[in-house]
Image (tube, rainbow, N blue to C red):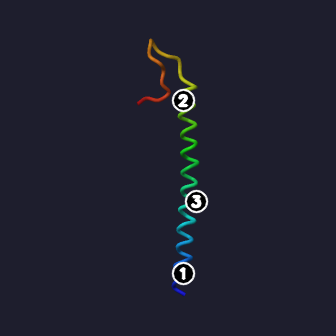
Amino acid sequence: MVPLLLVLLLALILFGAGFALKALWWIAIIVLVVWLLGFVIRPAASGSRKGRWYRW
């Protein structure tokens, strides 16, 4: 009975980790797209400097 519970617990942990990693990959792709769009959609440049869509 104990080995069966350990196998089920391991399967549950691996399923949870797999789902979390898949969600993190989707978040990383969305952030990358937003970052790349920031280079395309820039505000008008002030002076001779190129405009930045972020503050830092």
Task: Identify the residue shown where x is 48% and y is 21%.
Answer: 51
**Which residue in the structure is indicated by mark 3?**
19
Q: Residue at x 53, y 72 (%)?
A: 10
**Label 2 neighbourhood size at 10 Å, few (<14), some (14-19), many (20+)?**
some
Q: Where is residue 42 in the image (x, y as percent from the top left)?
A: 54, 23
Q: What residue type is labelled 2?
A: Gly
Real-space Cα separation, disc 3 to disc 2, in angstroms: 29 Å
Residue corresponding to mark 2: 38
Which comes before the other along the chain, label 3 or label 2? Answer: 3
Numbered tag placed on residue 46 in the rendering: none
Disc with the residue nearer the chain's start (1 vs 2): 1
Residue at image location 54% in from the left, 51% down from the top: 24
Q: Label 1 neighbourhood size at 10 Å, few (<14), some (14-19), many (20+)?
A: few
- The residue wearing badge 1 is 5
Image quarter of residue 20: bottom right
Element class at badge 2 = helix
Write down the quadrant of residue 4 in the picture: bottom right
Q: Are marks 1 and 3 in contact (CB under 8 Å)?
A: no
Quadrant (top left, top right, bottom left, bottom right) of the C terminus: top left
Whether 33 is drawn above or below 21: the answer is: above
